[in-house]
Image (spheres, rainbow, N blue to C red):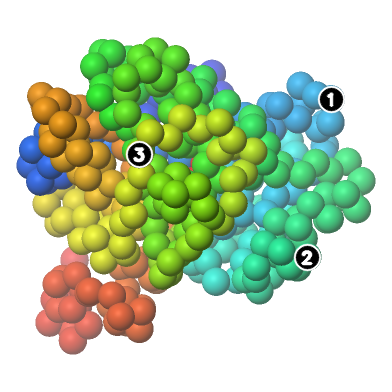
Amino acid sequence: MNITQPFGSTLDLIGNTPLVLLKGPSEAAGCEIWGKCEFANPGASVKDRAALYMIRDAEARGELKPGGTVIEGTAGNTGIGIALVANALGYKTVIVMPDNQSSEKMATLRALGARLVLVPPTKYADPAHFQHTSRRMAEETEGAIWAGQFDNVANRRAHIETTAPELWEQLEGRIDGFTCAAGTGGTIAGVGLGLKERDENIRIALTDPHGAALYSYYAEGELKSEGSSVAEGIGQGRITANLEGAPIDTQFRISDEEGIAWVEKLLRDEGLCLGLSSGINVAGAIALGQQLIGEGRENPRIATILCDTGFRYLSTLYNAEWLREKGLPVFDWLENDADGAANSDVD
Ligand code: PMP
């Protein structure tokens, strides 16, 4: 990789993220587990790619004109990506977000200059749901477009055209499986389609958190959820347009506890500070590696997505009080911090 390559614009910084071999997960699986470092995008998440593609698509269709506004309903990361891309291209941003998302995401969106509209979390069928609210606002605002990431397939095209070929090249065409969780489904469907174009034997697995309906859909053909998850940005209850025709070969259901255990180990042992969806993806990648090994595949190589930075969750996932409140295990070093025993020196 040529790291001295200069870029002509901020937008060129999106994508071409590094791929890292994850030591602990590879040892646990007994094969290579690779993580695509999507936290290295300018907006620190996988959603910068979709934001860029949806905005470029609206421009190409003639719907988004100079000085226009991009409106979106998002759990946060897509909004951050849209705000950055919109700033770079001279558009305004309005983001509608459920009010139970991390305060870091809200503060980040405000800092980037987006107008933030918070709504109470509610069922998708409720007209007050953040997605419907954002669509109505776009319809009522002059010069505005609704990005509509869930059913806008420019989202998954970003992954067909960029993430999949990057993975293929980075692994020199030797990849046996890919897995990740779905929010909109853009990543799993797009990477799945892009990789299958190159080698149809690559196994594509959906990794679903508890509380989502896709695991049972792919396992039994029925949208049905079980349990719940505190993971932000993932967990889908319907087949979005991005998920239609997604080449899902197999599926895993991963608990928050399993995901958090990997978030903890990756930070403690490998210096990677990630969000919970990344931990869930890594647990899914290990399950996929073990499945392929169980079928006799030798040294399978699995890739997954490290979706966003843990710095976005300092008040939640990395906060002992919040973890305790949710009944989740607290990382050792956070326990120490709580009674003032650690970090007492000021440098
Ligand atoms: N992880 C995080 C933290 C996210 O914000 C998202 C996007 N909602 C995803 C994973 C899932 O990505 P996708 O929308 O492409 O399914």
Going by the numbered disc 1, the residue's amino acid type is: Gly
Q: Is residue 41 visible?
A: no
Mark 2 and ligand 1: say if the CB distance to the nearest ligand atom is below 8 Å: no
Q: Earlier in the sequence, mark 1 or mark 3?
A: 1
Nearer the observer: mark 1 or 3; the answer is 3
Q: Nearer the viewer, residue 327 or 79?
A: 327
| Residue under the point 70% across and 44% down | 148
Q: Position of residue 19 (x, y in %)?
A: 28, 30
**What distance separates the C-alpha of mark 2 from that of mark 1?**
28 Å
Three-letter amino acid code of the residue under disc 3: Thr
Residues packed near mark 2 inside 10 Å, few (<14), some (14 to 19) or many (20 plus): few
Q: Nearer the viewer, mark 2 or mark 1?
A: 2
Q: Visible in this render: residue 339?
A: yes
Q: Are marks 1 and 3 in contact (CB under 8 Å)?
A: no
Taking the view exactly as shown, the residue that stands out farthest to the bottom is 339
What residue would you read off at disc 3?
250
Determine which residue is flagged by label 2.
127
Q: Residue 320: x and y, percent?
A: 28, 77
The mark that comes first in sequence, 3 or 2, is: 2
Label 2 sits on what residue type? Pro
Q: Relative to 304, say whether 281 is above or below.
A: below
State left or right for residue 150 relative to residue 254: right
For this view, does 65 lie left or right of residue 343? right
Q: Which residue is mark 1?
A: 62
Q: Position of residue 250 (x, y in %)?
A: 35, 39
Which mark is first along the chain, 1 or 2? 1
Where disc 3 sits, the SS reads strand
Q: Position of residue 286 (x, y in %)?
A: 20, 43
Q: Residue at x 56, y 38 (%)?
A: 243
Q: CA distance from mark 1 to mark 3?
A: 39 Å
* Most foreground residue, 33 or 118: 33
